[in-house]
Image (spheres, helix red, strand yellow):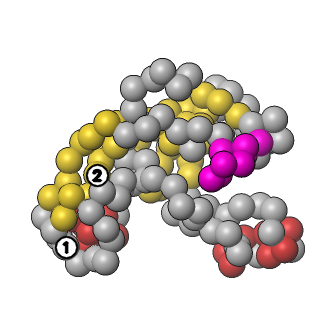
Amino acid sequence: MTSQANRGVVYKGPGEVAVESIPYPKLELGNRKCDHGVILKVVTTNICGSDQHMVRGRTTAPSGLVLGHEITGLVIEAGRDVEFIKVGDLVSVPFNIACGRCRNCKEGRTGICLNVNPARPGAAYGYVD
């Protein structure tokens, strides 16, 4: 599916965002295949206070950051280790994304995941992993 076009809402600087072409997501983290991940086609997203702070320039976020979180999307691809979600499912993604594999997650303490929110683009638009 890497031939798909993808777009994202990009923070350009204080008071400025733009919809731009961004890379289509891959099921990998760095150079490592991510068999426990999914790719979603974003159906809807929320705008929250943190988004407004960024647009108003009250942030240390770098220019070029792809915005968006708290999304609902359609699963279009799933890694082989994904157990409870399948292609075609409609899912919601919380703000803090726990890995599900670290010591804290395995103990049920996903709110203090050791790998929360890996370096990934936001999801206000398009496709996301």
Q: Quadrant of the C terminus?
A: top right
Q: Which residue is labeled 2 in the image?
A: 10
> Which region of the structure is painted magenta?
28-35
- Residue 110 belongs to magenta span: no
Residue 67 place in picture, x, y as percent? 35, 56
Q: Amino acid at mark 2?
A: Val
The location of residue 24, given as percent across then percent down, is 47, 34
Q: Compare residues 30 and 114 and report the one nearer the observer.
A: 30
Residue at image position (19%, 64%) is 13
Please tell me which residue is depicted at 80% across the width and 69% down the height of the picture: 102
Left or right of 63 on screen, residue 85: right
**Tag shown at residue 57:** 1
Q: Element type at marker 1? A: loop
Rendered residue at 81%/35% (across/down): 80
Residue 108: in sight, yes or no? no
Q: Is residue 13 visible?
A: yes
How many C-alpha atoms fall within 10 Å of the one at disc 1: few (<14), some, or many (≥20)?
A: some
The mark tally for this picture is 2
Question: Within 10 angstroms of label 2, few (less than 14), some, or many (20 or more) residues?
Answer: many
Cα separation, mark 1 vs mark 2, equals 13 Å
Q: Which is more N-terminal, label 2 or label 1?
A: 2
Asked whether, in this view, residue 35 is left or right of residue 29, the answer is right
Observer-nearest of 1 and 125 = 1
Which quarter of the figure has residue 90? top right
The spot of residue 115 in percent (x, y) is 68, 69
Q: Amino acid at mark 1?
A: Gly
Residue at figure coordinates x 61%, y 33% from the top left: 75
The kind of secondary structure element at disc 2 is strand
